[in-house]
Every structure is written in C-alpha cells, then in structure tokens.
Amino acid sequence: MDYARYYGNNYDEERLGKRFSSLSAAFTENEGFAPERFFSSPGRAEILGNHTDHNHGLVLVAAISCDILAAVAKRDDGKVKICSEGYSPFTVDLSDLSVSPKEKGTSVALTRGVARAIKDRGFDIGGFTAYLTSDVFRGAGVSSSAAYEVLISEIFNSLYLGGRLSAVDKAVISQYAENVYFGKPCGLLDQSGIAIGSLSRLDFKVPTSPVIEKYSMIEGYTLVITNTGGDHAALTPHYAAIRSEMEEIAGYFGEKVLRDVPYVKYRDALPELMKKYSGRAVLRALHFYEENERVDEACAALSENDAQKFLKAVNDSGFSSLTRLQNCAVPAETDQRVILGIELSRRIIGNGAVRVHGGGFAGSILAVVKDDETENYVAEISRLFGKENVFKASVRKTGAEEVK
C-alpha cells in the first residue's frame, strides 16, 4: 500500500506492516472471519487560530501523520460494535439514537451522535464491527475525539452512503455528535482539519460552509508535538468558558459571535466593556480579533515561503494564548506543564517557534523546528517529558478515508 499517503515520507514500513497485520489478526481471531476494509482517520495540528472557530473566525490547521486505524466489516443486525485497543468493547444499537446523559463524555455517545446526525439527513445506515488501534495522543490536543467522530462518519459514508458525504458534511456531523451527545461545546476546527486533510486555511464566517484554502508547509522545518502531561477529559468547563466569555462580549453589541462585531466597535466600547465584563473576557475577545489577523499573516508567509514571517505569527499566537486567551494552565493550579514545556522549548530551539497546541490548559505544545535542529530538540524535550510523548509530524494530504 501507499504508506506515504498517510504517514509521510519518513515512515517505518516494518512497523506499519505489523500494525496493519496485528489489527487484522485481532479482528479475525475474535470475530471468526477477516475484516473487509480498513480506514484511517488522522490527528490534527492547529497551527494558528486558537479558540477562534466557535466564534466564526479564521484558522490554519493541518491533518498530520498519526491516525486511528480501523479494521471493519458490515453486520446485518443494526448494531455498531467497537473494539478499541486498550479499552473495553461496546455496542450501540442503531434503533435507539436518543441522547443519554449517562453516556456524556464517552465514545458510545460520539458513535450514537454521528449515527443520529446522518439519519437526520435522510440517509439509511446499517451496522458494522470495527477494531481500532490509535497512535493519536488521547486528551493531549491532537483531537483524538474528533479523529474518532470523523472515522465513524466515514465508515458509515463508505459502507452505506456510497461516499455521498463531503468532507465538510462529515465535519459538521462530527461536531454535532461532540456538542450534543458528548457534551463539549467545540467549534468546527478539529473535525474540519481531520476531514479535509492537508494544511488548510478555514474561514468559518458561515460555519457549515467554511471557505477552504490549501497551503504547503514552510520548507526546511518540522512540526514536533509534545504531550506535556494532563488530560483534557475534565477540562470541558474551562473550554466552555472561553466560548461563553467571547459570546458575552458579542452579546453587548446584540450579536451572537464576535465575527459579527467589527473590531472598531469593540475598540471604541472598551471603557464600557471593562465596567460590565471581566477583564479576562475583554482580553479573550482581543485575542480573537488579533488571532484572525495572524492567520492571514501566516498564510501570506506560506505563499511567499517566508520562514521568519511565518514563525513570528506562530510565536505571537502562542504569546497571545498565554496572556490574553489564558489557556496555558488551569486557573489556580500549580502544575503548569504546558507553560513549562513552552519555556524550556524556547531555550532549546534556535530559529523556530513554539506555542500551546489545541484547546490548552493541559496536554500538548507545538514546536516548529528547523530540520537540522529537529533531532537535538526531540532528544532534549524527550529527556524532559519522555520519548513516548514526543511526535514528529508530517502534514498529511488526505483526510479520513478508506485505505485502499
């Protein structure tokens, strides 16, 4: 198979071959027959656009060369059976797709939510059995939940819909599952990046129809993602507060989201905003406006292959997340491993950039490192956080899809 399509040019063919064969063997041993198909759904790297999507802003996001891999076969009893390596298997009966409060925050909820959203679009779907293995960091900002949602969407799409769902359809369906069934009020960045693939500028002015522009990564640099520790599972209230505080500021102007409030109105109203709302809410709104500008600055730099301009935009975004968005540490907690990882990275990296990655508060950081400095950076950051928590990422051109 074309491993480079999914895992970049520096893949370990022997390791990947064993990964596919082990997954197939597990399916065959437990089910008594071989899987019919394989699917791959990537993780994602948020390059710029930290917490702007839910207020209809701009982002720069890449699908990357880690994935959830699934061995799949149809079944005719109207049930979805998921057996994920390292977790207890579960089954979802497609005859009951109601929201269950007891399932909030689980893969069961995501599966049921994806199925509901597809059926609500008028499609008939059926069951399947899927065995999953993943090298996408869970709870560390690479979007394991979104990778799972889009994977389930694409399996239904391929098995029962003849591929009629577009990448954006799958992203919107997956976001619905996460918002309504899983209970996390996320925007559409994660799901879109994973469904679309490549390195993409996404404009969410109309969230269900984002404007997509694709770019090539800056030459001579490598993305390195480090899991500094912590889990996103208990952080939903903190993510929700970012969105709600931005929307509070928008509400002052009679709008639902900041994208519909011109910056000049926000600027002129600052004295009144400071009286009525918390300083943190005012700062988070400022981050939104400036982050949108940085996305366009970074895209212009990519078009020109201007490394210094691109790195400046990434570093400025990270500084804004730290000081304005304030999502680099859980408030009042002393275990500030994201900030620690960023500051230590700055002392290792020469001419590069580093920032919080993803939702924040705990989890991962993203570094953009010169190719000839990458091995040293990986060695040093591995010494601090563990080799198993450091991942060199390639931009993956394809989104979630069936592996042919």
Image (spheres, rainbow, N blue to C red):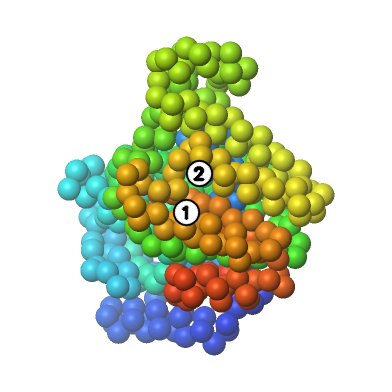
The residue at 33%/73% (across/down) is 85
Amino acid on which the number 2 mark rests in the picture: Leu
**Disc 2, SS:** helix
Q: Residues within 10 Å of mark 2 (few under 14, many from 20)?
A: some
The residue at 66%/34% (across/down) is 293
Q: Tell which of 280 and 171 is nearer to you.
A: 280
Q: Position of residue 172 (x, y in %)?
A: 46, 42
179 vs 46, left or right, is left
Q: Position of residue 169 (x, y in %)?
A: 50, 44
Q: Earlier in the sequence, mark 2 or mark 1?
A: 2
Q: Tell which of 225 and 341 is nearer to you.
A: 341
Q: Residues within 10 Å of mark 1 (few under 14, many from 20)?
A: many
Residue 30 to residue 121: above or below? below
Proximity of marks 2 and 1: CB atoms separated by less than 8 Å: yes
- Residue 322: which numbered mark, if any? 2
Q: Residue furthest right?
A: 304
